[in-house]
């Protein structure tokens, strides 16, 4: 992926993502080992979810009208992701180049830097078991759920979500297609995510996507924006699985019917005291951490609420009442280093603003993307998002990936909407 040079608002592509972390192998290695960033170790060997994995999903006295969380044998086969040498990374936190070139000591399949060029061992392990650890999978714990009425009225939690100025949004529908790939984290590998993603925007997004294929594809966005937005699906675990016995589905511990959102709002907002700069075309980033359990909670940014209690935000699955609908809030970082379209871990070129919405020195404010997903919620504790098997559907693993393919004219117009305190929608490409 190309690095960027920005001059007078013009973005020029040059160079390689391998050099984005401060030069050479050392910078990338540091970003993966955590020696100079908050990413956590790139080696997540046999890490377990941060939740109490030993507890039963539902005690007998809690089944009632909530349904059986482990009903239909859905947690039974147990699959876990293990993660010791998988190439999926973290849905972005994998420390490999998106195109999988294997430069700077990184192999295509190990998801971490091979500083000593010993990739053969990793490749052998991958060949022996490309989807390790599936025996650890199970459904979410009872403690992963909370009655929304028990959540403190807090307005916002986690990083991002402090907005100011105007906004612009794009209507891309609610669900264009599904697969368990991730072209950013596991380029070229089918079922590279080991959980199913919901996509809107670009209609072609799969394991083999690259800039050329994305630019040639159609889009579900009404204004022709070819950007790709994706996140793990939400399932009713008592429903009929469309992928029983398949990779990404029950083989990886993801069971039940896939719930289509009733709405998917994609909105870019201003923040802080400074005007935002236009978002560059082909900027890629992630939010949240699909492997937060294996990485000790690093970069988790899960936010859930209910449509009739939006001042109460929680990192647990909320049980809504009074007709409220479940909502997921996916807040992206909005401070850009001004140079790189991506980084080896899809994080280092981006940062979150502070509590006032301002960026630290060296970072430029760009529009803050919030994706708001709304669902008709199944009763009780019978729903969960897809996850890597050993993350056991922990709600804190919620995450999302985004590549901006809007035209630069549209990006410029969006920044103007924000800076002029206007509300805009479906800007022409």
Image (tube, rainbow, N blue to C red):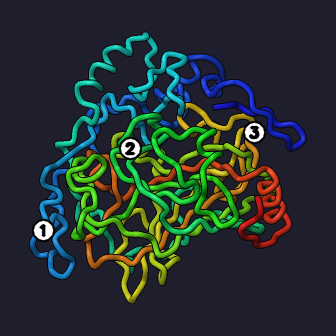
Answer with left or right where residue 425 lies relative to residue 59: right
Which residue in the protein does label 1 denote?
Answer: 59
Residue found at the very far bottom of the displayed protein: 322
Residue 120, horizontal then vertical, whole percent: 34, 14
Q: Position of residue 46 (x, y in %)?
A: 26, 34
Give me the C-alpha separation between circle 3 and circle 2: 29 Å
The reply to whether callout 1 and callout 2 are in contact (CB within 8 Å) is no
* Badge 3 vs badge 1, beta-carbon distance below 8 Å: no
Label 2 crowd bin: few (<14), some (14–19), many (20+), radius 10 Å:
many
- Disc 1 from disc 2: Cα separation: 31 Å
- Residue that extends furthest to the left in the rendered view of this protein: 60
Asked whether residue 278 is in view, the answer is yes
- According to the image, label 3 marks what residue? 338
Q: Viewed as shown, does residue 333 lie left or right of 181? A: right
Tell me if residue 338 comes above or below residue 121 in the rendering: below
Which callout, 1 or 2, points at the residue further toward the start of the chain? 1
* Between marks 1 and 2 in the image, the one whose residue lies nearer the viewer: 2
Residue density around tag 3, few if under 14, some if 14–19, many if 20 or more, within 10 Å: many
Return the residue at label 2: 193
What is the distance, in whole Å, between disc 3 and disc 1 at their CAs?
51 Å
* Residue sitting farthest toward the right: 8
The quarter in which the C terminus is drawn is bottom right
Q: Quadrant of residue 87?
A: top left
For the residue carrying disc 1, how many other residues have a C-alpha within 10 Å: few (<14), some (14-19), or many (20+)? few
| SS type, badge 3 | loop
Picture disc at residue 105: none
Residue nearest the viewer, comparing 25 with 220: 220
Circle 1 sits in a helix, a strand or a loop, which is it? loop
């Amino acid at each position: 992926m190309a690095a960027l040079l920005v001059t007078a608002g013009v973005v020029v592509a040059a160079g390689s993502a391998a050099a984005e972390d401060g030069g050479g192998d050392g910078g990338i290695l540091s970003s993966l080992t955590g020696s100079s960033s908050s990413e956590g170790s790139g080696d997540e060997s046999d890490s377990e979810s941060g939740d109490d994995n030993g507890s039963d999903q539902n005690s007998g006295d809690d089944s009632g009208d909530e349904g059986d969380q482990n009903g239909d044998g859905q947690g039974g086969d147990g699959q876990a992701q293990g993660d010791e040498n998988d190439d999926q990374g973290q849905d972005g936190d994998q420390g490999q180049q998106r195109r999988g070139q294997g430069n700077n000591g990184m192999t295509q399949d190990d998801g971490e830097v091979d500083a000593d060029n010993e990739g053969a061992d990793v490749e052998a392990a991958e060949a022996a078991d490309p989807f390790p650890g599936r025996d650890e999978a199970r459904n979410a714990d009872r403690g992963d759920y909370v009655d929304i009425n028990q959540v403190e009225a807090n307005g916002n939690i986690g990083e991002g979500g402090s907005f100011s100025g105007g906004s612009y949004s794009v209507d891309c529908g609610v669900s264009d297609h599904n697969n368990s790939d991730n072209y950013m984290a596991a380029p070229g590998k089918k079922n590279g995510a080991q959980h199913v993603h919901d996509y809107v925007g670009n209609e072609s997004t799969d394991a083999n996507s690259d800039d050329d294929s994305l630019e040639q594809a159609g889009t579900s966005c009404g204004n022709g924006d070819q950007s790709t937005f994706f996140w793990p699906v939400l399932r009713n675990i008592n429903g009929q699985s469309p992928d029983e016995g398949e990779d990404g589905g029950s083989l990886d511990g993801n069971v039940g019917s896939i719930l289509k959102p009733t709405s998917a709002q994609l909105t870019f907002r201003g923040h802080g005291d400074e005007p935002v700069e236009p978002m560059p075309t082909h900027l890629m980033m992630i939010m949240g951490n699909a492997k937060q359990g294996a990485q000790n909670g690093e970069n988790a940014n899960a936010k859930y609420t209910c449509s009739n209690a939006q001042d109460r935000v929680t990192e647990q699955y909320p049980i809504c009442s009074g007709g409220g609908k479940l909502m997921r809030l996916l807040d992206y970082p909005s401070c850009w280093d001004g140079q790189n379209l991506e980084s080896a871990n899809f994080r280092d070129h981006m940062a979150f603003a502070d509590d006032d919405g301002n960026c630290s020195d060296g970072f430029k404010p760009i529009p803050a993307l919030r994706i708001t997903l709304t669902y008709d919620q199944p009763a009780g504790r019978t729903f969960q998002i897809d996850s890597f098997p050993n993350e056991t559907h922990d709600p804190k693993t919620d995450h999302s990936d985004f590549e901006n393919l809007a035209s630069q004219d549209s990006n410029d117009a969006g920044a103007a909407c924000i800076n002029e305190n206007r509300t805009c929608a479906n800007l022409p490409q």
